[in-house]
Image: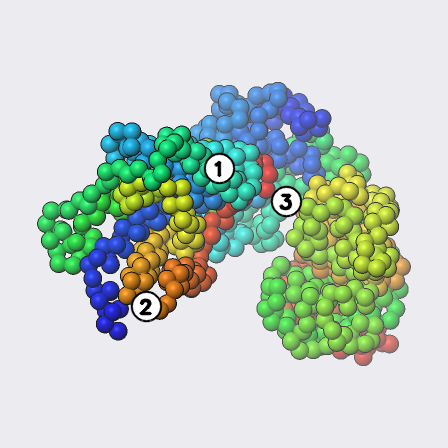
């Protein structure tokens, strides 16, 4: 089993894990925020596509990369607002609205993309984020290049895990958000309007989804194509359950999935005689197994998917 | 005395319905005012206006002389008004401390000061004797503890005026007693309280002043010391209400017999070697503090679960298949303990709820199709005969008030003409007028020869309806005493597990011809 050992000890493999995990981390944090406040957001797949397109488009038109990221986040927040308005004050079905947002945002992204580049046959590329070597730390053997030679958005994602974990667990706002996901009546009884709290949190979560999409175009693939999100959004929805709605565990889940993905990519190149589609299935299969093991004890936010109407129980 | 709260000329309409009309109410410092009224009299609406959940159409709320801006709970909290909701406003997955602290700090600060919060909570909890663990998850707490958290939440917000919406609705008698003792202690500390209730005895024992609300208007105000239960009942209902009197029994053959029934853990507490007999035309009252096995006993008799050991005999034949359809076919009618969770399906129509239990009978279905016309006709008949107000065959049943829902359930059960009726907490949460109606129906069923197994924790109800009474304690049944020998003190002893007096009474009241049967009964 030399091949396996070679793969598992290569710097390239582990460095890829963190890179592949980045959009999953951002997206999972986004879904987690929405669900913690009590709203399912299945718009993620479309919002990621939109963020990927918008970020790319800004940079393609001469904006710098960070402006591209910010634009993508704002675009995500805008779709978040739409989702929030439909599901919170109007109390519409969160499944249906989310899927609608996904379909709409995906098609809209491609439409805008085609308006911007009507003729190009192969997708135009941009100059992406480059790996940022952190001085001193990146000299640590093995771990240095794996962790401290990533692009800036990856570092951002890692910082956000800590920030959101702190925010949810240690700040008054985070407590109110969690409470709104457990029992919005209780939030109302304490004088905070759960409607606004939910709208704001959904927008913040959707902004993170936009960032997750922008990572794909601005740090991973250098260009936009309409099918590039490829189910990553759905994976994020599953990862939140896997993570039992906890940010640190969301990081763990994203890394685990990314590990399977990086691993199968390398297996494809060295194992012969097996159709590569089999390897493509591997991460999803293992994710389902992991979900079965981890999610059985999960503590679901009690008010998840229950619209809040004053005076109704 | 200083006046801390003033509601003047409050009017609130929902569409065509006027929930409150020109209601004025005031509260002095250190006073306990009971807001008494039947379900639907507008008590909760009035308090929701005070707390800023609703905006009044007319009128004004003043706290310490300053008007409150309408529709803002935050302003009410700041002014020192705290509300303890009937349906607890708590998040089950969060800890007690988290529940209490939500919304008490600026939302934009980067760090929540938990240690200060904990210190304040512990101090309050000690001061008022409201014992609770700050780090316990609310889902692990009992109902009584949840209520303590609700009260602590209000106190933590520095409430000086506390409003409690039907605080004893979910409490056991002992819990309610200790709650009122705590409330008394709070007034000594300068807090002022309003509690909403429809229970006369607690209004009489716990308040200084009573304000009676009927159909949205204040109909009377009395100093508690200068009024009586009877007067208040009449004011609240608007007419003289008397619970029906029990005519003498003519017990017939044994319809239902339990022999040494044992069942562990199902649906609550266990049963240990329970034996009893229920005759035609008599009511056997089972009294007990909830959680002592009565729910399990009712479930077992209604066919929800089979016993682990022992035998259940219906009409002298041992039951072999313990499931609900067989129980119904054997003539058992059930009034479930929780009418919302088990008795009805809220979002289905009244007619569907009426016939669901008997949907396979040829009366309501043929060749796999529901006979809607017959079902609707049967429903209309029940609505008419049992005076179910506000119901239509095609309306959703959740829109009915508790009392009317219970009337429909009674109608559904009694129209099927059961030989045995299992009535679990039949009047829980109902107001005086509705209780009288339910009692009348139960006596009627007994009068036409049915055996009624009445399970209740209400002393008056058990004494008023039963022929014989047994207490259930930790899954065991006490000796049976005849109702005319029962009084609150004796039943209290029996519920506490002291059965010596009951055993003596049972021995001395056994009729010679029943001697053998009754001795078995006591085993």
Residue at the disc numbered 3: B202
Q: Where is residue A44 in the image (x, y as percent from the top left)?
A: 43, 43
Disc 2 chain ID: A
Q: Is residue B408 left or right of residue B176?
A: right
Q: Nearer the viewer, mark 3 or mark 1?
A: 1
Whole-angstrom CA distance, mark 2 to mark 1, is 41 Å
Residue sitting at 30 percent across and 51 percent down? A20
Residue at the disc numbered 1: A104
Q: Do the residues labelled 3 and 1 touch (CB within 8 Å)?
A: no
Q: In this view, does B229 lie to the left or right of B176?
A: right
Q: Which of marks 2 and 1 is in front?
A: 2
Q: Do the residues labelled 3 and 2 touch (CB within 8 Å)?
A: no
Residue at the disc numbered 2: A272
Task: Say yes or no: labels 3 and 1 on the same chain.
Answer: no
Task: Using the image, determine if residue A24 lies above or below residue B71.
Answer: below
Q: Nearer the viewer, residue B482 or B146?
A: B146
């Amino acid at each position: 089993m030399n091949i396996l050992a070679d793969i598992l000890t290569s710097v390239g493999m582990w460095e890829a894990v963190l890179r592949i995990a980045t959009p999953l981390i951002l997206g999972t944090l986004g879904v987690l925020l929405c669900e913690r406040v009590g709203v399912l957001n299945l718009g993620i797949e479309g919002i990621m596509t939109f963020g990927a397109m918008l970020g790319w488009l800004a940079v393609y038109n001469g904006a710098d990369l960070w402006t591209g990221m910010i634009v993508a986040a704002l675009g995500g927040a805008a779709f978040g607002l739409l989702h929030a308005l439909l599901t919170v004050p109007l109390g519409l079905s969160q499944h249906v609205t989310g899927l609608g947002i996904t379909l709409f945002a995906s098609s809209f992204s491609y439409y805008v993309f085609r308006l911007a580049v009507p003729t190009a046959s192969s997708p135009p590329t941009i100059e992406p984020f480059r790996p940022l070597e952190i001085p001193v730390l990146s000299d640590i053997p093995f771990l240095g290049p794996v962790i401290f030679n990533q692009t800036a958005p990856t570092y951002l994602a890692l910082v956000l895990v800590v920030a959101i974990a702190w925010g949810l667990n240690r700040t008054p706002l985070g407590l109110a958000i969690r409470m709104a996901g457990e029992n919005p009546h209780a939030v109302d009884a304490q004088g905070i309007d759960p409607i606004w709290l939910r709208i704001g949190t959904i927008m913040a979560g959707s902004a993170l989804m936009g960032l997750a999409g922008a990572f794909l175009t601005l740090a991973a693939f250098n260009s936009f194509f309409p099918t590039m999100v490829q189910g990553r959004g759905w994976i994020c929805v599953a990862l939140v359950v896997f993570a039992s709605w906890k940010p640190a565990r969301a990081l763990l889940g994203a890394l685990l999935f990314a590990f399977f993905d990086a691993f199968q990519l390398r297996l494809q190149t060295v194992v012969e005689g097996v159709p590569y589609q089999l390897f493509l299935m591997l991460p999803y299969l293992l994710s389902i197994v992991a979900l079965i093991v981890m999610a059985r004890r999960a503590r679901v936010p009690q008010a998840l998917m229950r619209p809040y109407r004053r005076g109704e129980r | 005395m200083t006046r801390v709260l003033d509601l003047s000329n409050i009017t609130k309409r929902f569409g065509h319905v006027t929930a409150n009309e020109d209601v004025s109410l005031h509260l002095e410092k250190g006073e306990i005012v009971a807001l008494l009224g039947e379900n639907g009299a507008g008590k909760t609406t009035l308090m929701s206006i005070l707390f800023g959940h609703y905006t009044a159409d007319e009128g004004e709320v003043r706290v310490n002389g300053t008007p409150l801006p309408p529709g803002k709970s935050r302003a009410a909290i700041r002014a020192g008004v705290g509300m303890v909701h009937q349906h607890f406003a708590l998040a089950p997955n969060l800890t007690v401390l988290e529940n209490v602290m939500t919304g008490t700090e600026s939302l934009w600060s980067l760090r929540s000061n938990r240690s200060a919060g904990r210190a304040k909570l512990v101090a309050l909890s000690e001061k008022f004797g409201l014992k609770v663990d700050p780090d316990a998850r609310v889902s692990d707490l009992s109902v009584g503890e949840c209520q303590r958290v609700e009260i602590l939440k209000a106190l933590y917000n520095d409430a000086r005026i506390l409003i409690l919406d039907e605080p004893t609705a979910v409490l056991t008698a002992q819990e309610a007693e200790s709650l009122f003792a705590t409330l008394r202690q709070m007034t000594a500390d300068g807090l002022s309280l309003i509690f909403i209730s429809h229970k006369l005895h607690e209004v009489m024992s716990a308040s200084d002043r009573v304000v009676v609300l009927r159909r949205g208007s204040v109909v009377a105000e009395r100093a508690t010391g200068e009024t009586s239960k009877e007067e208040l009942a009449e004011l609240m209902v608007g007419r003289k209400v008397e619970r029906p009197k029990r005519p003498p029994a003519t017990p017939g053959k044994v319809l239902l017999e339990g022999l040494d029934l044992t069942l562990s853990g199902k649906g609550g507490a266990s049963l240990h070697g329970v034996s009893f007999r229920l005759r035609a035309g008599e009511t056997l009252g089972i009294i007990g503090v909830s959680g002592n096995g009565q729910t399990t006993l009712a479930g077992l008799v209604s066919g929800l679960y089979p016993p682990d050991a022992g035998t259940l005999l219906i009409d002298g034949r041992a039951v072999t298949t313990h499931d609900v359809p067989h129980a119904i076919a054997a003539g058992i009618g059930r009034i479930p303990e929780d009418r919302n969770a088990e008795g009805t399906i809220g979002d289905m129509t009244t007619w569907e709820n009426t016939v669901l239990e008997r949907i396979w009978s040829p009366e309501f279905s043929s060749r796999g199709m529901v006979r809607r016309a017959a079902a609707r006709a049967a429903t209309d008949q029940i609505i008419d005969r049992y005076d179910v107000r506000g119901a239509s065959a095609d309306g959703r049943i959740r829109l009915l008030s508790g009392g009317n829902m219970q009337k429909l359930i009674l109608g559904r059960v009694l129209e099927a003409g059961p030989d045995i009726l299992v009535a679990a907490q039949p009047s829980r949460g109902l107001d005086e007028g509705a209780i009288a109606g339910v009692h009348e129906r139960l006596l009627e069923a007994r009068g036409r020869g049915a055996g009624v197994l009445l399970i209740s924790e209400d002393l008056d109800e058990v004494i008023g309806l039963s022929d014989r009474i047994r207490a259930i304690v930790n899954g065991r049944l006490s000796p049976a005493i005849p109702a005319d020998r029962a009084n609150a003190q004796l039943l209290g002893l029996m519920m506490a597990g002291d059965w010596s007096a009951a055993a003596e009474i049972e021995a001395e009241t056994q009729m010679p011809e029943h001697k053998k049967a009754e001795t078995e009964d006591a085993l």
